[in-house]
Image (spheres, rainbow, N blue to C red):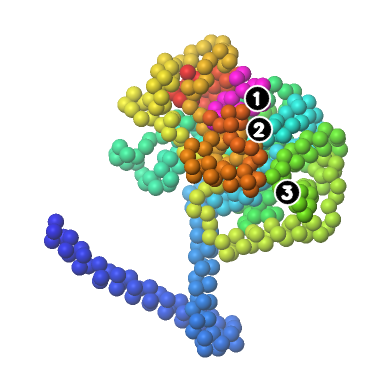
Amino acid sequence: MQSFFQTFCHTIPTTVATVHAGIMQLATQLRIALFRFLDTYLPTQSGYIRSNPKSSLGLLAFISYLALVRSLRWRQYNAIHKQYQKKYEQGKLTPEDAQKIIKPGMGYDMPFVLGYALSFALFKTYGVPSISKILKGTKELSSKEGISKRYTDTSILISTWIACPISGKTDPEVESNRFLPKFASSDSSVELPEDDPRAMIALARVNWLHSKYPITNDDYLYTLALFAFEPETWAKRYGWRELSPLEREAYYIYWAEIGRRMGIKDIPTSAKEFKEWVEDFESRVMVTAESNHHVANYTLEELIYVLPETFGIKSFAKRVSITLLDDRVRVAMMYPEQPPIMHYLVTGSLLAMAYFQRYLCLPRIWSQKYVDPKMPAFAKKNDANGSSCPYPHVHSSAQANRNGIANGLGAEKDSTTLNQDHLPRMHPLQFTQRPWYKPEPKNFLERAQLSLALWAGLYEERPSKELRSDGYRLEELGPLKFERVGNEETIRMAEELQQRPITGAWARG
């Protein structure tokens, strides 16, 4: 062993020298190639650069940086197309494939643009009177508290659909940050897929909440279509690249599957047919209504609440938001037309950002997300019996329902009769001005960070029990009046969607 160590140490200088020589040789070749290019296309500039060695080095470094950006910027795009392009051409993409295809764009490539596309998709539905009247009637959007909680809960639910597998099984690559090998391994450290019912619990909760309101099938269809097609529109207008045919088809396949699991009927069989239906629907029903303006204005005011009134910043932000609306939607919401200069300014700024991102900005290292796609620690298997929760009192209650569905109850059990304090909960990764589900600070550093955020106006109040600082359960999301209602029924609906029991930490034990 000592002899091996000595030999290894002696080889280090030789290895370093070899690597250094290789780098210098590569730099020389790049410099020669650069001057050949300049001599051919920019002879005047070539002479100046030859007489200024520092300029040539700076230009070489800049060109190398551009090449690096180009190489890394398209890495996620190329990888996903290499994996799924053939299946797309054969017409064999599954909803599970589609979910994996749309994730890189939303998490790494264009999270800002595609995230706002989904936000504006939901906002756009307020231009339909039959939808806005229902929302206005709920009174949930008539207060800052109601709007902020609805916005947070909606973000969590939709983000859970997208981030967590609709197959109901964990993705080993996600769980291991993509460092697991692509092949099967006998290594016990390689985690096999586990049950992950989060997406179906979130979907079941939305289905349960929607069942309380008289929503028409056409309104469901229209909302579904906006989620499927607005990302394509926004990427084309404001993104550093358009969505590819593969990605566009994946969005349609994924959201059509979500629609089927929501029980939406008459979903068009192709994206083209669906877009034609949307155009006809909007031309017929998207008309001016006071309820449209009421709901849209309350929501918009909440979204820009954090901005100061000083120098007209908040007013300007509202005008920017209106500028981003299509004319048909703007008219239906009774918002004034914005001057051409606003359109030029907003569009120009977004396109400049897209240009910078495409050619000059290195891609994200970490995915932008609202909820963590990785399984929470409390839900991972950690013993030979497959226990999914580290808390003994949760495990013991959950163990009793392993062979049954929803605790084996044949009828709905009122959630208010249970002591829910023992149920493990989750926290989102982002927070609004009213920080719903944000944990209370536990140490000096966290308290200092919170104080700074409050001083800067990022939050309007401290995390508290009132804002559910203990975290959320997916089956409890929605208006506060429904927090303890329909929880077991939601779990049973989720079990029907994924066609197997929900046990362990996810059950209402």
Q: Which residue is mark 1?
A: 480
Q: CA distance from mark 3 to mark 2?
A: 22 Å
Three-letter amino acid code of the residue under disc 2: Lys
Which of the numbered marks, if any, corresponds to residue 149? Answer: 2
Residue 19, given in percent of the width and then of the height, sits at 33, 70
Indicate the quadrant containing the N terminus: top left, top right, bottom left or bottom right.
bottom left
| Residue name at image x 65 percent, y 55 percent | 239
Classify mark 1: helix, strand or loop: helix
- Point out residue 496 in the picture as x, y percentages from the top left corner: 54, 22
Picture quarter containing residue 190?
top left
The residue pinned by badge 3 equals 308
Stretch in magenta: 471-485
Specify which label sits upstream in the sequence, 3 or 2. 2
Residue 207's spot in the image, x, y percent?
63, 25
- Closer to the chain start, of discs 2 and 1, is 2
Q: Is residue 206 above or below residue 350?
A: above
User: Height in image: 70 above or below 122?
Assistant: below
- Secondary structure of the residue carrying tag 2 is helix
Say if mark 2 contacts mark 1, CB within 8 Å.
yes
Badge 3 element: loop
Q: Residues within 10 Å of mark 2 (few under 14, many from 20)?
A: many
Magenta stretch: helix, strand or loop mostly: loop
The three-letter code of the residue at mark 3 reads Pro
